[in-house]
Amino acid sequence: MEPLAEAVSEAVASGAVPARMEFMDPACAGAVEDYLRMGLPRGRALLLVETDGEEADLVEEELSLVEASARRHGAEVVRAAGEAEAEALWRARRAVSPALGRIRPKRVNEDIAVPRSALPQVVREIEALGKAFGLVVVQFGHIGDGNLHPNILFDPRKESEEKVWELAHEIARVALRHGGVLSGEHGIGLMKRDFMLEAVDPETLGALHRVKEALDPLGLFNPGKVLP
């Protein structure tokens, strides 16, 4: 995972802005292969990249930047032979959720976003946290945006949900330590409400509360969510 993250950081720094840049760690890619049986490589992280644009030579140049960065970090680079093969690979990415459901009956889907320059350190620290807590953690997501979805997989009949939420909190702290945010797209809701105490300074939190009270004095809009 760390070389993959380094390749992404390097490609983006070189000027590549792919239309889609998604990844799966080895455990995630293995789960998808067990589910779909489509010939994905075992034991390796997978980076899926798609570029687009109006000028073919610029599209090719952008793709070449990504390929060069990936090769420098030890990747085996394969281009889809056509639209059907490309669609099959994107189908693999869309199959992550049902594939992970076959490993454990429940999961917590984290949704952090971090600066792309911090990706190598972040994926390494999350991997280490999973091992330290003795829980199954897989990583996937929209890595081109720095938006990661570490998933904690667990069986509530055998594993402590309290420990799972403690790990979720630690993953959120990883994002904050590296200049990231608690959510890239899923929002705060109830799950990360208490994490806001660490993500936002008291003055800003007070301002958010005052805005909330001004627009929603009776507390009818999404009651109890977002703000601790």
Image (cartoon, helix red, strand yellow):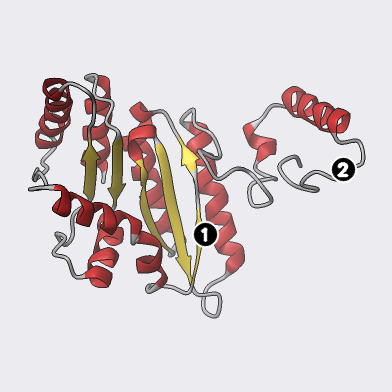
Q: Is residue 173 left or right of residue 139?
A: right
Q: Is residue 55 above or below residue 23?
A: above
Q: Which mark is residue 108?
A: 1
Q: Is residue 123 above or below residue 116?
A: below
Q: Is residue 75 left or right of residue 25?
A: left
Q: Earlier in the sequence, mark 2 or mark 1?
A: 1
* Residue at the image point whose x is 29% and y is 39% from the top: 21
Q: Is residue 146 above or below residue 27?
A: above
Q: Which residue is mark 2?
A: 219
Identify which amino acid the numbered label 2 is placed on: Gly
In the image, residue 201 lies at what x, y percent? 69, 26
Distance between the alpha carbons at the discs numbered 2 and 1: 28 Å
In the image, residue 73 lies at what x, y percent? 14, 36
* Residue at the image point whose x is 76% and y is 42% from the top: 228
Identify which amino acid the numbered label 1 is placed on: Val
The quadrant holding residue 28 is bottom left
In the image, residue 120 lies at what x, y percent? 31, 36
* Residue at the image point whose x is 35% and y is 50% from the top: 140
Q: Is residue 73 left or right of residue 48?
A: left
